[in-house]
Image (cartoon, rainbow, N blue to C red):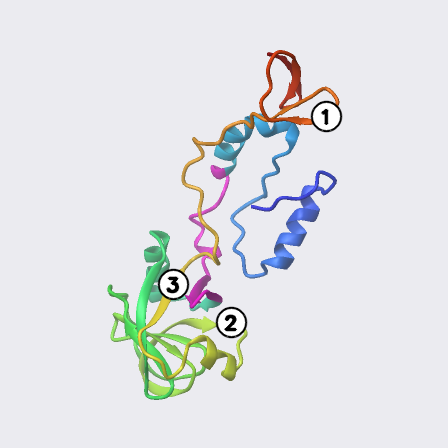
Amino acid sequence: MIVSSASSGISGVVADAKRLVPDAVWMGDALSIKDSNRSNASTLIQNWLGTLNFDNEQTMNKMYLTIDGTTKSVTLTDNDASKALVEKLRQGPVTLTLNSSGGFEIWGALGFSLPASDQQITAQPGDVILYNGSNICLFYGSNSWSYTRLGKIDGLTGNELSTFLKAGQSNISVTLSLTSGVTAINDVSGVTEKTEYYSLNGQKVTMPSNGIFIRNGKKVAL
């Protein structure tokens, strides 16, 4: 959700949003709610949600890793394992406890299995790997083994990866999700009109009584 001044058009707001959140997955057109249509916000949001393309697999080529409050994007590999992982994450974020191992990775159990297509590969820094079908490995170094690729962490140098992944540490809490800190809207039944009152000269009135006031842009008599 982005709040802007009344003078800003929706196209400018969308452009700013895409600049500020370049890794965001856009599921459809933006919804603009202004003072003039605020009283109908619940219906507008319900109708807008119905137009969003949550089930388009082509938009699900990103996953997000959050460690100690920092979130980084992962570009997913196009294979059965990553698709199954996306389906799992559609149900909600998954938080894991991973540990450093071998001087090149942090790894641990997913708590569920994914379809593996193991090949002998050399994992590189930034690689997100499925190991033995039910373990995830996040690499800050290199190692050759029989793995299934899940994806690659975007845009970090070797030193940045080591810092982000807390290389050498144990009991690292890692959250996998399909959003970069954005919470989905599940229910808009609680959306209500504001009940703020203003005097006829534009001053806000906290406890209006016995007079004519402005509420939601209209005159009301109390």
Q: Is residue 94 above or below residue 187?
A: below
- Helix, strand or loop at mark 2: loop
Q: Is residue 220 left or right of residue 61?
A: right
- Helix, strand or loop at mark 1: loop
Alpha carbon distance from label 2 to label 3: 14 Å
Q: Is residue 132 left or right of residue 222?
A: left
Q: Which residues are magenta?
A: 49-72
Q: Earlier in the sequence, mark 2 or mark 1?
A: 2
Q: Quadrant of residue 115?
A: bottom left
Category of crowding for the residue at label 2, using alpha-carbon neighbours closer than 10 angstroms: few (below 14), some (14–19), many (at least 20): some
Between residues 27 and 104, which one lies in front from this camera angle? 104
Alpha carbon distance from label 1 to label 3: 49 Å
Q: Nearer the viewer, mark 1 or mark 3?
A: 1
Q: Is residue 211 above or below residue 87?
A: above
Q: Residue 71 colored magenta?
A: yes
Kindly identify which residue carries mark 1.
Answer: 202
C-beta proximity under 8 Å, tags 2 and 1: no
Q: Residue 109 colored magenta?
A: no
Between residues 146 and 192, which one lies in front from this camera angle? 192
Disc 3 marks which amino acid? Leu
Kindly identify which residue carries mark 2.
Answer: 154
Residue 99 % position (x, y) = 31, 78
- Helix, strand or loop at mark 3: strand
Disc 1 marks which amino acid? Gly
Residue 25 % position (x, y) = 52, 55
Q: Earlier in the sequence, mark 2 or mark 3?
A: 2
Kindly identify which residue carries mark 3.
Answer: 176
Alpha carbon distance from label 2 to label 1: 51 Å
Category of crowding for the residue at label 1, using alpha-carbon neighbours closer than 10 angstroms: few (below 14), some (14–19), many (at least 20): few
Q: Earlier in the sequence, mark 1 or mark 3?
A: 3
